[in-house]
Image (cartoon, rainbow, N blue to C red):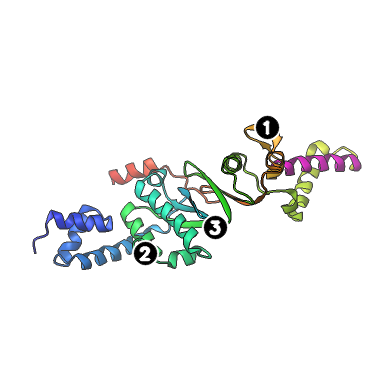
């Protein structure tokens, strides 16, 4: 059967495969479009599995908020170049919407769900994206809230999801911006675990500048230092980024209360590869 350019284009549009791969698949199955798609899917899965050993510390954080529900997700890839790719961005945004609307309990359940838009299982969609884009792609984590939810995403690299007691768009926007900028770990001191406080006291007590001071004086200095440190880590005690003379607690008093928040920083905790991607590309070209 004669494989036409139109057929190749149609297969590329449906699968995202390269031109030569699409043509080869059509030739292999004598022009049968459905079988060609299956061939590419199978090869894509094989290709994807080869890439899963790589480190994926780049990617995007995206969110979706609508009608008393919101979600934020981190989807990783290998390079910042791919993270800015329109196909990858749209994929991450679509996953955030799925989390909000379908409420999976964890990443494994999300990967087993069927995408309402394309009708495919998400784990298969991921493998197809890996085959199409050419990099390892992983869904790392997500969070979902119900209630009065607000969000802020900074360049796909820092994300905030916030739940408050009341609706106040201007104030919650400022709160999201503040959380993104100041990186609090807790809402208030009531949330700080006892072992965290004990650890910080131990660290401060062991500092050289206190070694020669009497024990009672050391204890008072350590208490003051730990209090200051905890204030920096608690949202309500932090100075508001737009007006440092006012704390967040003062800013929101009488207007709303903060129920919970999550702040994601892209790739935090993931070991990043030490090699230079540009050098890797040049090496492949030379090879």
Find numbered disc 2 in the image and state the secondary structure of the residue it sits on: helix
Precedes in sequence: disc 2 or disc 3 = 2
Separation of disc 3 and disc 1 at Cα?
A: 31 Å
Q: Would you say residue 232 sits in the magenta stretch?
A: yes
Viewed as shown, does residue 228 lie left or right of 215? Answer: left
Reading the chain from its start, which is encountered first: label 2 or label 1? 2
Crowding at mark 3 (Cα within 10 Å: few <14, some 14-19, many 20+)? many
Number of numbered labels in the structure image: 3
Extreme residue toward the left, this view: 2
Q: Main secondary structure of the magenta part?
A: helix
Q: At numbered mark 1, what does the secondary structure look like: helix, strand or loop?
A: strand
Residue 179, label in figure: none
How packed mark 1 is, by other alpha carbons closer than 10 Å (few <14, some 14-19, many 20 or more), is few
What segment carries the magenta color? 216-233
The percent coordinates of residue 85 (x first, y second) are 36, 46
Quadrant that contains the N terminus: bottom left
Disc 2 marks which residue?
A: 124
Q: Which residue shows up at 38% across the image and 46% down it?
A: 82
- Asked whether the beta carbons under mark 2 and mark 1 sit within 8 Å of each other, the answer is no
151, above or below 111, in the image? above
Give the residue at x 34% y 62%: 118
Q: Nearer the viewer, residue 237 or 123?
A: 237
Q: Position of residue 171 (x, y in %)?
A: 60, 41
Which comes sooner in the sequence, label 3 or label 1? 3
Choose between 141 and 52: the one closer to the eye.
141
Marker disc for residue 144: 3
Q: CA distance from mark 2 to mark 3?
A: 23 Å
Residue appearing at x 64%, y 51% in the figure:
165
Question: Between 39 and 67, which is closer to the camera in this rendering?
Answer: 67
Q: What residue would you read off at disc 1?
A: 244
Q: Look at the image and tell me whether residue 233 can be seen.
A: no
């Amino acid at each position: 059967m004669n494989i036409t350019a139109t057929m190749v284009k149609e297969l590329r549009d449906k699968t995202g495969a390269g031109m030569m791969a699409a043509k080869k698949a059509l030739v292999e199955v004598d022009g049968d479009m459905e079988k060609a798609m299956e061939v590419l899917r199978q090869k894509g899965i094989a290709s994807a599995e080869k890439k899963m050993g790589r480190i994926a510390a780049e990617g995007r954080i995206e969110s979706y908020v609508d009608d008393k529900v919101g979600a934020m997700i981190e989807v990783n890839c290998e390079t910042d170049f791919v993270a800015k790719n329109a196909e990858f961005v749209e994929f991450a945004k679509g996953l955030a919407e799925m989390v909000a609307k379908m409420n999976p309990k964890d990443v494994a359940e999300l990967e087993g769900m069927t995408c309402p838009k394309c009708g495919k299982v998400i784990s298969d969609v991921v493998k197809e994206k890996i085959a199409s884009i050419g990099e390892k792609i992983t869904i790392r984590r997500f969070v979902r809230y119900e209630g009065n939810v607000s969000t802020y995403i900074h360049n796909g690299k820092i994300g905030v999801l916030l739940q408050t007691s009341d609706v106040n768009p201007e104030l919650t926007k400022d709160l999201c911006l503040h959380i993104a900028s100041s990186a609090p770990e807790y809402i208030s001191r009531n949330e700080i675990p006892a072992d965290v406080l004990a650890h910080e006291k131990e660290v401060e007590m062991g500092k050289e500048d206190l070694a020669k001071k009497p024990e009672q004086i050391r204890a008072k200095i350590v208490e003051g230092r730990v209090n200051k440190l905890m204030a920096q880590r608690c949202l309500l005690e932090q100075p508001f980024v737009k007006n440092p003379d006012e704390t967040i607690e003062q800013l929101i008093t009488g207007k709303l209360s903060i129920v919970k928040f999550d702040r994601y920083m892209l790739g935090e905790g993931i070991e990043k590869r030490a090699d230079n991607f540009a050098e890797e590309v040049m090496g492949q070209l030379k090879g």
